[in-house]
Amino acid sequence: MALAKEFLADGVVGLEKWDAMAPDQIVPERRESVPLLVDVPVERERSPSTNDGALFRDRKGSAAELEPTWDGDGRSIDAFEHSQVEEIVVFEQIIIRKHRTARIFKAVIENGFDPLAQSSISPRCGPTRLPDMPIQADWKHNDLSIGEQFSRK
């Protein structure tokens, strides 16, 4: 961002440009099976907030069918509950994304940091050294993977 043409020309970070590089995420429409919910009896609770002292709460419970289990003699010994499900459609979702790094960079600049000033460059940088890279005297063969070297550059 510090080397972008627009920033070098006028010192302004164009968030629109950077946001365009972070396109919105589109989650496609899908179908899901969810437990079927049915009304269950209303609970009554005593409450001083109503005139008659009763507060009503609606509850939803999952619909289930009981499947009996039989022993060898044909007697029912237990029942297993099988929840009923319904298929619902979850519509397409668009998640609007912003370029977070560009916003951080802009905030740093607004706080007075000038990335183009010589005083802003780390003292670890110089004509013979890249930041976070070992100098020739400290170099150890195969000490850093290619990925680590690339990340440090």
Image (tube, rainbow, N blue to C red):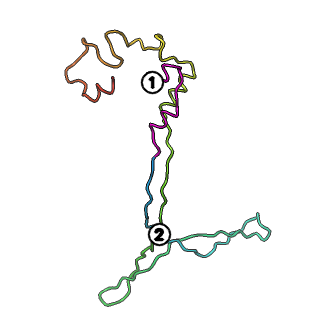
Q: Is residue 13 found left or right of 51 in the rendered image?
A: left
Which residue: 46% across, 67% down?
34
Check disc 1 and report the residue beneath it: 4
Residue 147 location, quadrant: top left
**Mark 1 or mark 2, which is nearer to you?**
1
Disc 1 is placed on an element classified as loop
* Location of the C terminus (image quadrant): top left
Q: Position of residue 119 (x, y in %)?
A: 48, 10
Amino acid type at circle 1 is: Ala
Check disc 2 and report the residue beneath it: 35
Q: Is residue 28 covered in magenta?
A: no
* Location of the N terminus (image quadrant): top left
Amino acid type at circle 2 is: Pro
CA distance for labels 1 and 2 = 53 Å
Which region shows up in magenta? 1-24
Q: Is residue 4 covered in magenta?
A: yes
Q: Are marks 1 and 2 in contact (CB under 8 Å)?
A: no
Residue 129 location, quadrant: top left
Which residue: 54% across, 74% down?
38
